[in-house]
Image: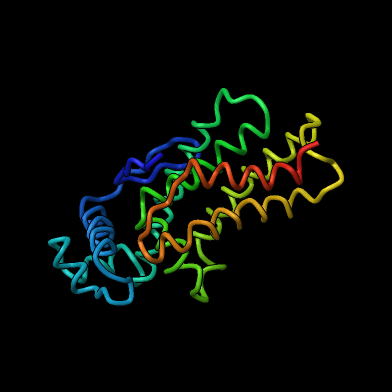
Amino acid sequence: MPINHNPNRVSAKGDVKAFPPGRIKIADALRGLLEQKEFNAITTAEIARSAGVTEALIYKYFKDKRDLLHQVLVEYLEQYHVQVREDLRGIQGALNKLRKLIWSHIQVYATNRVFARILLIEVRNHKDYYRSETYERVKIYSSTVLDILEEGVANREIREDISIKLARQVILGSIEQVCLTGITFNREIDPDMLTDAICDIVFKGIAR
């Protein structure tokens, strides 16, 4: 499930906030440059040249280069969260929903390496991550996983004697760990195989 990039911001409710053309060009320029090199090697002058704007315009819309990075990531996360909610519609059963969510998560990492690298490598290791809007968006997404687990307990699909918050961390952490090497070294990531492997292990531990 690759993300179909929308140059404007899409909220969790599906509302669209239109951005000025200059801001869209700047964000698109950074995305393009991130496909070629590491974030720390990119300068604001490069971004401006690629976008066909002045450096001053970057600072009109963003505090600095890292703020631009976070805003690009937030847009990805918002679009992905909307897509996940759409994908889960009509699926019956908490375990079936978890399997679909795990597959979708891995598929995004497999098909959108810029998004994956920004989230797992460029942003997570910086001291400002836990005070960022990016982190708030990640928490919103992780609450979706918790909701599914709670649904499973209520429906007696999932054991009530386990910590569902810990189960959520196990699921999300497993996804990141099995994908990280592929993201770092640009290797193939197989969503079908990895989803089966994670579900086989995790579901044996949480299912009634």
Query: Between 2 and 187, which is closer to the camera in this rendering?
Result: 187
Residue 41: x and y in percent read 28, 77
Position of 40 relative to 177 (above/below): below
Residue depicted at x 41% and y 60%:
183
Residue 91: x and y in percent read 59, 25
Residue depicted at x 21% and y 55%:
25
Residue depicted at x 17% and y 60%:
51
Query: Between 23 and 87, which is closer to the camera in this rendering?
Result: 87
Q: Quadrant of residue 93?
A: top right
186 left or right of 53 in image: right
Q: Quadrant of residue 177?
A: bottom right
197 left or right of 203 in image: left
Quadrant (top left/top right/bottom left/bottom right) for the C terminus: top right
Position of 60 relative to 197 (above/below): below
Residue depicted at x 21% and y 71%:
56
Residue 8: x and y in percent read 32, 45
